[in-house]
Amino acid sequence: MPLNSDISPPEMNTKKRLKFLFKDTFLYGGATAFNKALSLITFPILARHFSVLEFGVLDYFMSLAALLLTFLIFGQDSAVARFYYHYEDSETRRQLISQSLFFQLFVVIIILPLLWIASDWVSDFVVISSQGSDLFKIVIFQMPFLLLINFSINLLKWTFDRGPFLILSVGNSIFQVCALLLAIFVLDVSIKAVLLITLVTSAIFGLLGLFFIRKFLIRPTNYKYLREIIPFALPNGAICVLGAFSPAMERTISAETLGVESIGLYATGAKLAMVMGFFVNAFQTAWGPFSLSVHKEANAVRIYNWVLKLFTLMMCLTALILTLLSKPLILYLTTDRYLGAWIVVFPLAMGLGIQGVSWITEIGIGISMRPKLSLYAYAIAIVATLFGIYLLTPFFGLLGVGLGVFIGHTVKSLIASILAQGVHPISWQYGPVLALVATSIFGGFASIYIIDHFEFMVGNLLICAIILIVFLVGWRSLFCKEDRARLKAILLISRCRK
């Protein structure tokens, strides 16, 4: 069911459908991206306040927190969303919600004490830091509250309870950012203090979230709905865990191979590449329900190809522009201590862009309801990423880490797209899309080589030339004259309405 619209996607013509997708991407995906973008406010301040090594350790434990949370949830959020709309009776829905939350809290009660007992061993294994055990214990203690926040935000979103949803999602981020800024400027805090601030913020908003959803919670009479939820959650949970596992392992391998300080440089490059992630995640938010809502229509393939070509052009341009601006942005946001991070911006951003493109071409997996195929692709991608990092880092240093991640994204995208074609064939217009991606990859890495070995200005001029070529050739080769006119009309109407 579309939001803020009287027409559902299947009832629209091509122009209206594309406008619907753009609107949802901007409105709902943009809101999610804004929430995540608040972290960029603290990024330059934290980077300037801490040394490269300290910033790397802080970023590592924040990534570890995200991994642990994903592991504890293990796909329950997507499973509850799926079955919440399956049942219409309010009492059944309350049982479904309560059983899932109680099950997640039960998992927390079982696993977190074990992690607490093993904190010394785990911290020594994952990262080299004298405070590793204490920092890991703070992360562990934060988990129940992060789980409550995640559960509450999802439930408020499904029930369209917008006021509490905004307070809990955006309010949590704003409160945390303000607290961190105040602590850094006034108290000159340490890494441990920053993590304690995030713990206190999570506790406040976790309990607030529980208050907001109290009317949906009842005492479970049985746990029969878990028999429906858990089988559906397992493959999605495995995919989410693999996705969250990769960033933590990338940083661990970087520390082992290049030293702990490399984590700080890699984290800085990843923060800049996060700009690409905002666009990709915003698009994904709207693309999933939109693509499934129109897949039975006669002109669905035409719409899919339109979106594929336009999105590919935008992602290639964004990755190249980020590469062009990487050094100035690092110097502006941090200090010259982090300048070495520029070299991983292009492979990380381009890898995210390719992953975003593959979410379009692997739509056949969703249509055929075969989530296990995505799991296979993610599992192989993790192996490819780790193998690539281990193989390339000794030769290319920090760039080798970025290359390994880029290879992982590319392998996952290719395998998932091939598997999707096997279960639900779609007539994709791959030729011009692959040519555009290949041109962008060649131009981006050639520019990195020239800047790193020869001349900064020459490399930047090459990037500018590639950006111009990608735009002009992409605009002409991806879209026919009729398509270009239609796209201009859509953009013109949107601009006039503003």
Image: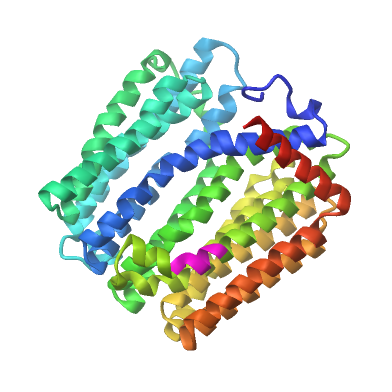
Kindly identify the residue that appears in the image at 15 percent across and 65 percent down. Answer: 130
Which colour assignment does the render follow?
A: rainbow
Relative to 363, say whether 409 is above or below: below
Q: Quadrant of the C terminus?
A: top right
For the view shown, which residue lies furthest in the left direction?
Answer: 187
Q: Position of residue 425 (x, y in %)?
A: 82, 51
- Residue range (magenta): 321-326
Residue 377 visible, this orientation: no
Residue 157 visible, this orientation: yes
Answer left or right for 466 relative to 198. right
Kindly identify the residue that appears in the image at 62 percent across and 65 percent down. Answer: 410
448 or 259, which lies in front?
A: 448
Relative to 487, say whether 61 is above or below: below
Please say whether residue 20 is one of the residues in the magenta stretch. no
Answer left or right for 298 relative to 8. right
Q: Position of residue 328 (x, y in %)?
A: 41, 67
Kindly identify the residue that appears in the image at 58 percent across and 59 percent down. Answer: 318
Q: Position of residue 388 (x, y in %)?
A: 52, 75
Q: Position of residue 89 (x, y in %)?
A: 57, 11
